[in-house]
Amino acid sequence: MKKYEHLIYSAVGLVALLLLLVAFNYLASTTSVRVDLTDGKLYTLSEGTRKILKRLSSPVKVKLYLSRAKRCPCRCAASRSASRTWCASSSVLPTIT
């Protein structure tokens, strides 16, 4: 038994780590908190923009014109995907063509 003790501890540790990762992933997926970790906070609205949006009395229609992902460079495809994600998660109901 002493011979395999370090293997047993390693296996138990790996299983515990796996369970912690699964639990963290589940808890993270049940919340809608988003964190902008980009340099310069590219996906965060400035305080001035937030103030303007709070004062709006009527809905704002946003129209995005983006190329199809297969015809444009990777950067455009990433922008298209990010735009769809942002629009879906915000209160803005855009028309994406």
Image (cartoon, helix red, strand yellow):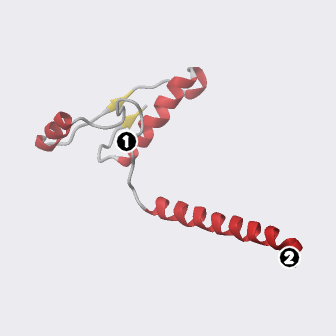
Q: Give the mark toward the camera: 1 or 2.
A: 2
* Residue 79 - label: none
Query: Which residue occupies 39% across, 49% down?
Result: 34
Q: Where in the figure is residue 21, as x and y percent of width and height?
A: 59, 61
Residue 24 is situated, as x and y percent measured from the top left of the image, at 53, 62
Q: Residues within 10 Å of mark 2 (few under 14, many from 20)?
A: few
Which numbered disc flags the more N-terminal residue, 1 or 2? 2
In the picture, the quarter occupied by the C terminus is top left
| Residue 12 x %, y % | 72, 71
Q: Nearer the viewer, residue 21 or 14?
A: 14
Q: Quadrant of residue 41?
A: top left
Q: Quadrant of residue 54?
A: top left
Give how far apart the Cα atoms at labels 1 and 2 are. Answer: 59 Å
Name the one closer to the observer, 90 or 67.
90
Picture quadrant of residue 31 = bottom left
- Image point (29%, 47%), residue name: 91
Q: Is residue 86 left or right of residue 71?
A: left
Q: Which residue is mark 2?
A: 2
Secondary structure beneath label 2: helix
Image coords of residue 64 (percent x, y): 37, 29
Q: Residue at x 46, y 29 (%)?
A: 79
Amino acid type, callout 2: Lys
Decide: marks 1, 2 in contact (CB < 8 A)?
no
